[in-house]
Image: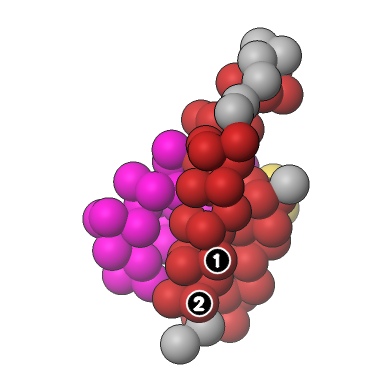
Amino acid sequence: MCASILESTLKDRLTSEDEDLLFKESNGHKTRKEKNFIDLINTANHINLIDKATSNTLHKIRKSRNRVVHELESIGEDEAYNIIMQTKDVIEGLYK
């Protein structure tokens, strides 16, 4: 759930900068295909919406989500708590 919230938050913040930042480029042309979570994180970092440390945090949360959703692994209480707190910190940073 945290990764979905963060993905939506990044979309919101990128849209407020320039709606075209949400879409992929193909041969120098914008397509209407939306960027995935990895691309959103990298774009936000590239335009300095987030710093490298925040980018790394987002990628860690994304990878944890992928382990749970795609590999059906479970995470412990401590990891879940840390992800929730990191999500809170990232969102606060994006809207300060």
Q: Position of residue 83 (x, y in %)?
A: 54, 47
Give the class, few, some or many, for how many residues have Cα within 10 Å of label 1's Cα (few <14, many ≥20): few
Find the residue positioned furthest to the front. 77
Q: Is residue 20 visible?
A: no
Q: Is the magenta region chiefly helix, strand or loop?
A: helix
Q: Nearer the viewer, residue 53 or 88?
A: 88
Magenta span covers which residues? 35-60
Which residue is rendered at x = 28% and y = 63% of the image?
51
Seen from this angle, which residue lies furthest left? 52
- The crowding category of the residue bearing disc 2, from other C-alpha atoms within 10 Å (few below 14, some 14 to 19, many at least 20), is few
Q: How is the image coloured?
A: secondary structure
The answer to whether 96 is drawn above or below residue 49 in the figure is: below
Q: Residue at x 59, y 28 (%)?
A: 76
Q: Which type of secondary structure does the marked residue at label 1 adopt?
A: helix
* Quadrant in the picture for residue 16: bottom right
Which amino acid type is shown beneath numbered disc 2? Answer: Glu
Q: Please provide percent x and percent y for residue 78.
A: 52, 38
Q: Verify whether residue 37 appears in magenta.
A: yes
Residue 13 position within the rendered picture, expressed as x and y whole percent measured from the top left:
56, 75
CB-based contact (under 8 Å), mark 1 and mark 2: yes
Label 2: which residue? 92
Determine whether, in the image, residue 59 is placed left or right of residue 76. Answer: left
Tell me: 2 left or right of 78.
Answer: right
